Image (cartoon, rainbow, N blue to C red):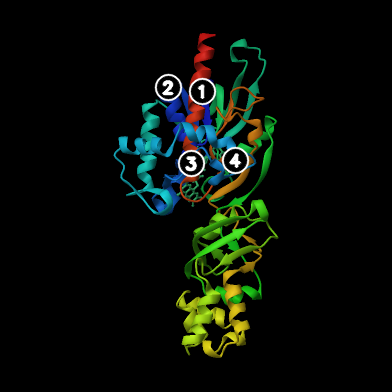
Amino acid sequence: MQEDWDVVILGAGAAGLLCAALAGQRGLRVLLIDHAARVAEKVRISGGGRANFTNRNLDPAAPHRHYLGGNPHFCRSALARFTPQDFIALMERHSIGWHEKHKGQLFCDRSAEDLIALLLAECARGGVERWQPCQVKNLMFLASSAHPASAGSYQIDTDRGPARARSLVVATGGLSIPKIGASGLGFDLARQFGLKIIDTRPGLVPLTFDGTAWTLYAQLAGLALPVAISTGEKKDRITFHEDLLFTHRGLSGPAVLQISSYWRPGTPIDIDLAPGIDLAAELRAAKARSRKLLANELAAWLPARLAEAWAGLDPAWQRPVNEASDKALAQLAERLKRWQLVPTGTEGYRKAEVTVGGVDTRGLSSQTMEARAQPGLYFIGEVVDVTGWLGGYNFQWAWASAAACAEALAERHAASTIA
Ligand code: FDA
């Protein structure tokens, strides 16, 4: 039997749940649909199971500092209207303990499950109906209809029956981690309604390096150290100061995840393995005072395993520091300060935390998230071409875009009721 709703929201992840809750609490009849068996799977696995749910360092006035996309200013309005403090207030209303890690990152004290419970409780408070698991079979806009009452509505056919609503919110997320429910439905719907998609690629993802050249470094798997990592040219150049982790297939850790969102295939990344240290001067000074092996001297500034592997790369470095030539020391310092390498690829959507690219923001209102050319159709969260840095910025975008959309849904509904 046909069911009528004020709004149908596709995707019961971070953005879809908060949008459903806030719209429901404003008096709208909300149906939330998800094809996965369990709600909010990505929230569940996020932040190592403790959900890095926002970031205090977010600056809504300068979103380009922490977000990428065709128009990094698109997210400014939503982020300014629903801030990290707003989400903290919600956490506190639910008595969920949280703590700050480095660089403004806020995590649940206990478990991401607490955050999921918060979202579900807020949905219950808003009287949200949830169909899950539920497959969307077909979706269309009823521009003109034999029944004038349903013209201007969205007709959604599902394996639980049909649903009809005046507004449709697409919150189906990106393509990363398909095994827990990611799909391209949101992009397909955007295309169906004439919106453009900015090419998608995995972001916040480990980088891989093939071939014999990597064999030496593969032995360093498990080793982590602080680095400065850069990519891009001139005004597009970006640098992160974070930890690097060697893996069997390449490089990971926060430094590499961050840079991966900016890295373009075929281009190099530059790594300073001893950031903040004038290695050339330190090695010259060591030469004047020490007879230790160069590898042992290097271990003062680098992890010993890395120092040893690195010194093993060139016979000129496999000797006591006082016997090394000035040129050899200068070359060693230069190589460590500017280790340039071209990744073969990434670990792909299987391991990516986010999808870079998505629904072109030029087709959406930055105030409401509504498609400019398609009344009543909204896109929120990761499906949109807005990608945050590692550190809680992606959840904050999900919350903020959801809140902006819920406000707009309430206004649209109120306007249509008055009309
Ligand atoms: P989200 O992916 O949360 O939800 C989309 C929902 O749509 C899912 O429930 C899915 O099942 C559903 N769906 C998809 N296709 C469908 C279809 N065809 N039909 C019906 N339903 C469909 N971010 C952060 O800020 N801090 C962190 O700590 C982390 N940690 C983290 C760890 C890992 C391992 C990953 C993979 C990701 C993160 N992230 C993160 C990123 C964060 O999880 C992500 O940006 C948000 O979950 C995006 O929220 P959305 O609601 O847009 O999508």
Q: Earlier in the sequence, mark 2 or mark 1?
A: 2
Calculate the distance from the C-alpha at mark 4 to the C-alpha at mark 2. 30 Å
Residue marked by disc 2: 26
Q: Position of residue 283 (x, y in %)?
A: 52, 80
> Number of numbered discs present?
4
Question: Mark on residue 59?
Answer: 3
Label 3: element kind: loop
Within 10 Å of the Cα at label 1, are there few (<14), some (14-19), or many (20+) other Cα atoms? Answer: many
* Residue 83 higher or lower than 316, as above or below: above
Q: Nearer the viewer, residue 354 or 37?
A: 354
Splitting the image into 4 quarters, where does residue 342 fall? bottom right
Within 10 Å of the Cα at label 3, are there few (<14), some (14-19), or many (20+) other Cα atoms? Answer: some
* Residue 56 higher or lower than 366, as above or below: below
Q: Position of 156 compared to 58: left or right?
A: right
Q: Position of residue 408 (x, y in %)?
A: 52, 23
**Which amino acid lies under the numbered mark 3 shown in the image of this protein?**
Asp
Calculate the distance from the C-alpha at mark 1 to the C-alpha at mark 3. 26 Å
Do tag 1 and tag 3 residues touch (Cβ < 8 Å)? no
Residue marked by disc 4: 72
Q: Earlier in the sequence, mark 1 or mark 3?
A: 3
Do tag 3 and tag 2 residues touch (Cβ < 8 Å)? no
Labels 3, 4: front one: 3
Labels 3, 2: front one: 3
Within 10 Å of the Cα at label 2, are there few (<14), some (14-19), or many (20+) other Cα atoms? Answer: some
Q: Is residue 279 visible?
A: yes
Question: Mark on residue 409?
Answer: 1
Calculate the distance from the C-alpha at mark 3 to the C-alpha at mark 4. 12 Å
